Image (cartoon, rainbow, N blue to C red):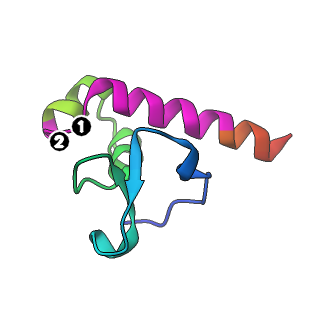
Amino acid sequence: MRSQPDLGWAGCSAVEQDPLRLSGAWVFRNTRIPVAALFENLEDGVCLAEFVELFPGVTREQARLVLEHAARSTAAALA
């Protein structure tokens, strides 16, 4: 998995980090699915609806919140 830049994930309610789970990677809350999986799948052409089907436990709302957080964080970093 490619490393994702630090986008201040602590400010996103849809994700969590636990040093004992997946080596401390940011994951979707209450899952073991890394946030990076969303971006990798989108890069590979998977649509959001398909992503939530492929990764049970991740809701469409969680994925939407992650994308919105990433967009806000990226825009703030570029400003």
> What is the three-letter code of the residue carrying label 2?
Phe
Residue 75 placement, left or right of 37:
right
Residue 7 placement, left or right of 29:
right
Place residue 55 in its image quadrant.
top left
| Residue at screen point 22% across, 32% down | 52
| Residue at screen point 39% across, 66% down | 25
Q: Which residues fall within the magenta stretch?
A: 54-72
Residue 26 percent location from the top left of the image: 41, 58
Residue 11 placement, left or right of 15:
right
Q: Nearer the viewer, residue 32 or 47?
A: 32
| Residue at screen point 54% across, 50% down | 9
Q: Majority secondary structure of the magenta segment?
A: helix
Q: Is residue 56 magenta?
A: yes
Residue 76: which disc? none
Residue topped by disc 2: 55
Q: Nearer the viewer, residue 49 or 76?
A: 76
Label 1 residue SS: loop
Quarter placement of the N terminus: bottom left
Residue 57 placement, left or right of 33:
left
| Residue at screen point 62% across, 34% down | 71
Residue 58: which disc? 1
